[in-house]
Image (cartoon, rainbow, N blue to C red):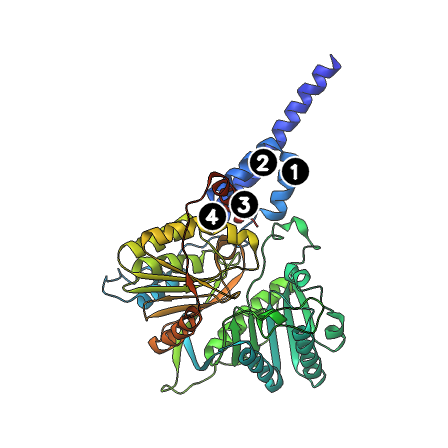
Amino acid sequence: MLNELFARHWVTLHGLVVMLGLAIYAIASHTLRQRRHPSAAIAWVVSLVLLPYIALPLYLMFGSRKVVVHRRASNAQTSSGQASDTENPATKAGQLAAAMGIPGATTFEQLSIHQDGGQALQSLRNMIDSAHQTLDLCSFIFGRDVLGDEIAMHLIRRAREGVHIRFLIDGIGFYLGGHPNLKRLSSAGVQVALFVSPLRSPLRGRTNLRNHRKMVIVDGEWMWSGGRNLAAEYFEGDQTSLRKKQAWIDLSFDLRGALAQQAQQRFEQDWAFATKGTTARTLRPAVQMSTTAAMSARLVASGPDQAEDTIYTLLVSGCFTAHSRILAVTPYFVPDSTLLMALTLAARRGIAVDLLLPRKSNHYLADIARHSALRELVAAGARVWLAPRMIHAKAILIDNELALVGSANLDERSLFLNYELMIAFYEPSVVQSFAQWVELQRSSATHYRPRPPGLVRELVEGMVRWVAFQL
């Protein structure tokens, strides 16, 4: 009798916990418009029903994909009229960006595309050494290696000279970089903050959301950005340590002008979030530039702090509006079904689709998961190229009209979970310059030749893709 009563109460309690978990999932998904991959949504629902005592705490820790409530576009943003089919991809991308509430295009000048790690490092040194008042850095990884040591010494010296320095490092990236010594930076006057440390506030639903943005801003006027983390392998490698690091191929750039101040505003928001601050540094007025030298570009931030999946939306739209060519380089290629369909349809309608990847990346699971999508792309007529060295660059070029360059990879974690930063360049000469950089890397690459997968291989690929969205 007691056993039956206990079982009845346990079943009732279990049902209440299941209902509570499903209610939290449904309300959070609806309120924050948490667009999820179908496999992720199914996995959460099944787990909440079968294992609610484990799944509910995990959902509270890792399940949230957005930290802002979705905002409906205002009439001012959406009343610009229908786009003409004859408009170029840059114009259509600009209209779409405005509709999503992305800050407008602004001016820049003196763009320098770094041809290799040595040039990128020299640019970074010059920026740190030339800062007069403020220096802000944001990186996913800060390496405990020869590069990290050099950057740290530069920052310590400049802080002691009176420059106001803030350094934002991702909470997980801090450990991936080898747990660098931040106390020496802090003791010298450098303000250091970890972006969502995994050891703090784990139940806020943000532990799984990483800040993957990379930027350095000097005096609000000079910006350095791209795909490089502040660690040795992203620049010139490290042959002095026991674990030797070979240099990777990566893409970064620096520029001056009002676009740098737009990046400064983005850094202020990220810093305030990481430090739970409510006030930001007073920004100087936008830099006035000569009209003859100024060009335009747009800062595109993506992530949980954006109501829309901005970079992803621009990529899908760009595939459908391209007239002649799509050229992309990325270290990891695990797209969702919509982006993959957009790329394959572009190839089928005669657009030259070229994708450059490393033959072997630093993430084994990503290399396994990519083959299904690559087979589909090649079957549609796209060309896939494999670089002999690890290539970490991230750029997507649409015709000769639009270049999206920055930190976002073409995988689901980057496009839906991470805080990312891309710059949309609209000037044809600038787009062509980035295209030349990608083509130079492609010159040593070989064609990807897909092979029909066996049953075991296909099952493994499917299992890896199923969990890739949450990795």
The amino acid on which the numbered mark 4 sits, given as a three-letter code, is Arg
Label 2 or label 3, whichever comes before in sequence order: 2
| For discs 1 and 3, the disc positioned in front in the rendered view | 3
Q: Which mark is residue 47?
A: 2
Q: What x and y, as percent, mark residue 37?
A: 47, 45
Specify the quadrant of the image occupied by residue 166. Answer: bottom right
| For discs 2 and 4, the disc positioned in front in the rendered view | 2
Label 3 packing within 10 angstroms: few (<14), some (14-19), many (20+): few
Label 1 packing within 10 angstroms: few (<14), some (14-19), many (20+): few
The amino acid on which the numbered mark 1 sits, given as a three-letter code, is Ile
Label 4 or label 3, whichever comes before in sequence order: 4
| For discs 4 and 3, the disc positioned in front in the rendered view | 3
- 231 left or right of 315? right
User: The residue tagged with tag 3: helix, strand or loop?
Assistant: helix
Q: Which mark is residue 467?
A: 3
The residue pinned by badge 1 equals: 54
The residue pinned by badge 4 equals: 35
As measured in the structure, the alpha-carbon distance from the residue carrying label 4 to the one carrying label 1 is 23 Å
Label 2 or label 1, whichever comes before in sequence order: 2
User: The residue tagged with tag 4: helix, strand or loop?
Assistant: loop
As measured in the structure, the alpha-carbon distance from the residue carrying label 2 to the one carrying label 4 is 18 Å
The amino acid on which the numbered mark 3 sits, given as a three-letter code, is Val
Q: What x and y, as percent, mark residue 444?
A: 44, 69
Q: Are marks 2 and 1 in contact (CB under 8 Å)?
A: yes
As measured in the structure, the alpha-carbon distance from the residue carrying label 1 to the one carrying label 3 is 18 Å
User: The residue tagged with tag 1: helix, strand or loop?
Assistant: helix
Label 4 or label 1, whichever comes before in sequence order: 4
In the displayed structure, 177 sits above or below 344; it is: below
